[in-house]
């Protein structure tokens, strides 16, 4: 429970007397009456009553009478105190103190009134009034702090000393404080803060706490703070901080993800080296601002932090900050991300002639991001895996398309297209083309009879051939697909597959059902390139 702070007892004893209604004893209108002020306990010993009095003539010591009324509910016991001694000043203007220790009987707070007369027999127009706190008081000795400078690695101070109990009734000081607690208090953050001290039977105490400014020790009596030790200023050293990104400048592909990460560090006041910030410290959050907005992240082990951008949509940046309060100076840094187009390279035609010329037709584009720019390379390799050598380059047009015939000095091995990428796009490569594959064609394709009656047999024939230098040779044992497209439609349907004979010829019969175009298609293999026949329209009646 936060306890209310009050002024030390010495200040309570210095309360100025409050005028109260009382009898007037003025002899004439020109007479200066006595004035009683500052009524309260002796600031050095609450067992004695003190007050200050002035008048035009000397105060009569024998006339001084004080009445002290205990502040309690119900009957309020009243004690009369007489016998006072001038302790400073003069009898006409001075401070008076009770000659003997007051025997009030009950500890507590007393409302006090003082009456007196001067040498002329004049009494105050208003009785002097004040408050006496007739309570046990703590007495602190041997107070000490283990440090008066705190930093990020040494945030706590330990206060030690002894506390004793002074009894105003007897004037005796006994070891220990049993009335209530003893507390170490100070500043931490924006307000006052306290922690209970561990007090031993002999009055020795110890309390450890994290602080940032001043500290002192005080005791609590009946939930009210009493006198305390003198405040001790604790100076605070703030350590420099910095953010170290794993990549201050990174790249990622459009449509992909990217994780920005780094370490938050401080300059150790002990070793003077940059050290990862402690994850458990509440003052070490990293504030990260970027495409995901602004978020505070608790540090992980080793002062680590990270954030993932799920989808890269363009160039962006992050700013990270740490510190700026408590024991840490502010530090920040920026990381940038450059987005790369996701390049795609397609080879739509790679026809190879017996004369060693290959058609290089395709397109350079991007599945995500702007259209890549730059030249496309035609590369050749003996085994299709290593030793790729650029044999020609092509420049795509504004749409990324390219189409050219290239003559090869060594028309053997394997070919591929390669785009090396640049600062704005990633590299891309096509599949590998084996130069030993021969060009094929389907010739003599025919569907008959024409026309044909519905339900009758329709026969398709043709020959699959491969290019052999300047001649064409039939290819046997290959699978040719017979296809059909209805007269009013656009969809081509594979009807059946037929195997070519020893001279490359194939034939297959169907039942005529409707008008449409028949054709044959051969799918490329590791030895032959693909080809498609011309279509043959058949009228079914």
Image (cartoon, rainbow, N blue to C red):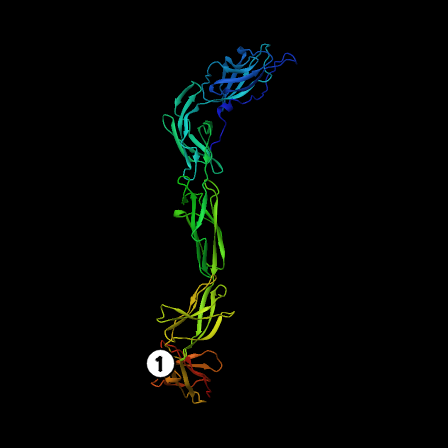
Residue 378 placement: quadrant: bottom left
Q: Secondary structure at mark 1?
A: loop
> How many labels were placed on the picture?
1
Q: Position of residue 493 (x, y in %)?
A: 43, 79
Q: Position of residue 80 (x, y in %)?
A: 50, 15
Judge whether residue 177 can be spotted in this image.
no
Q: Position of residue 93 (x, y in %)?
A: 57, 15
The front one of 277 and 438 is 438
Residue at figure coordinates x 48%, y 52% from the top left: 318
Q: Position of residue 259 (x, y in %)?
A: 43, 55
Extreme residue in the front direction: 409
Residue at figure coordinates x 39%, y 40% from the top left: 271
Vertical position of residue 470 compared to residue 150: above or below:
below
Which residue matches tag 1?
478
Extreme residue in the right direction: 29
The front one of 500 and 196 is 500
- Position of the N terminus, as image quadrant, is top left
Q: Residues within 10 Å of mark 1 (few under 14, many from 20)?
A: some
Vertical position of residue 432 compared to residue 540: above or below:
above
Judge whether residue 443 can be spotted in this image.
yes
């Amino acid at each position: 429970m936060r306890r209310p702070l009050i002024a030390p007892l010495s200040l309570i004893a210095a309360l100025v007397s409050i005028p109260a209604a009382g009898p007037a004893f003025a002899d004439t209108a020109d007479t200066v009456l006595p004035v009683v002020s500052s009524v309260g306990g002796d600031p050095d010993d609450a067992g004695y009553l003190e007050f200050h009095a002035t008048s035009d003539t000397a105060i009569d010591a024998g006339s001084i009478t004080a009445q002290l009324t205990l502040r309690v509910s119900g009957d309020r016991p009243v004690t009369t105190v007489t016998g006072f001694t001038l302790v400073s000043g003069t009898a006409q203007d001075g401070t008076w103190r009770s000659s003997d220790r007051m025997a009030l009987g009950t500890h507590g707070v007393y409302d006090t009134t003082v009456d007196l007369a001067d040498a002329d027999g004049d009494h105050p127009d208003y009785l002097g009034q004040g408050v006496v706190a007739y309570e046990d008081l703590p007495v602190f000795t041997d107070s000490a702090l283990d440090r008066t400078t705190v930093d990020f690695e040494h945030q706590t101070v330990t206060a030690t000393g002894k506390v004793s109990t002074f009894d105003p009734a007897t004037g005796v000081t006994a070891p220990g404080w049993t009335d209530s607690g003893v507390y170490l208090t100070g500043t931490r953050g924006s307000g006052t803060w306290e922690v209970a001290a561990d007090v031993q039977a002999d009055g020795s105490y110890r309390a450890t706490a994290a602080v940032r400014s001043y500290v002192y020790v005080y005791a609590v009596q009946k939930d009210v703070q009493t006198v305390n030790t003198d405040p001790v200023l604790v100076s605070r050293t703030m350590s420099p901080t910095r953010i170290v990104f794993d990549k201050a400048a990174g790249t990622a592909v459009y449509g992909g993800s990217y994780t920005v990460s780094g370490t938050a560090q401080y300059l150790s006041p002990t070793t003077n080296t940059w050290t990862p910030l402690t994850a458990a410290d509440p003052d070490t959050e990293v504030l990260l601002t970027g495409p995901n907005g602004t978020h505070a992240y608790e540090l992980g082990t080793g002062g680590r932090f990270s954030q993932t951008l799920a989808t890269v949509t363009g160039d962006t940046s992050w700013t990270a900050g740490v510190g700026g309060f408590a024991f840490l100076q502010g530090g920040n840094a920026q990381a940038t991300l450059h987005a790369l187009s996701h390049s795609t390279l397609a080879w739509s035609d790679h026809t190879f002639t017996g004369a060693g010329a290959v058609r290089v037709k395709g397109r350079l584009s991007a599945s995500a991001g702007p259209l890549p720019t730059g030249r496309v390379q035609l590369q050749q390799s003996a085994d299709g895996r290593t030793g790729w050598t650029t044999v020609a380059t092509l420049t795509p047009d504004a749409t990324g398309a390219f189409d050219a015939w290239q003559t090869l000095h060594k028309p053997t091995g394997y070919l591929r297209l390669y785009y090396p990428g640049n600062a704005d796009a990633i590299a891309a490569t096509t599949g590998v083309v084996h130069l030993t594959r021969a060009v094929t064609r389907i010739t003599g394709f025919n569907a008959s009879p024409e026309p044909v009656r519905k339900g009758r047999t329709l026969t398709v024939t043709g020959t699959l051939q491969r290019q052999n230098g300047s001649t064409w040779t039939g290819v046997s044992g290959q699978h040719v697909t017979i296809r059909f497209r209805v007269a009013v439609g656009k969809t081509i349907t594979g009807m059946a597959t037929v195997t070519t004979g020893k001279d490359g010829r194939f034939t297959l019969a169907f039942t005529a059902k409707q008008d449409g175009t028949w054709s044959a298609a051969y799918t490329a293999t590791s030895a032959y390139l693909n080809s498609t026949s011309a279509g043959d329209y058949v009228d079914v009646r």
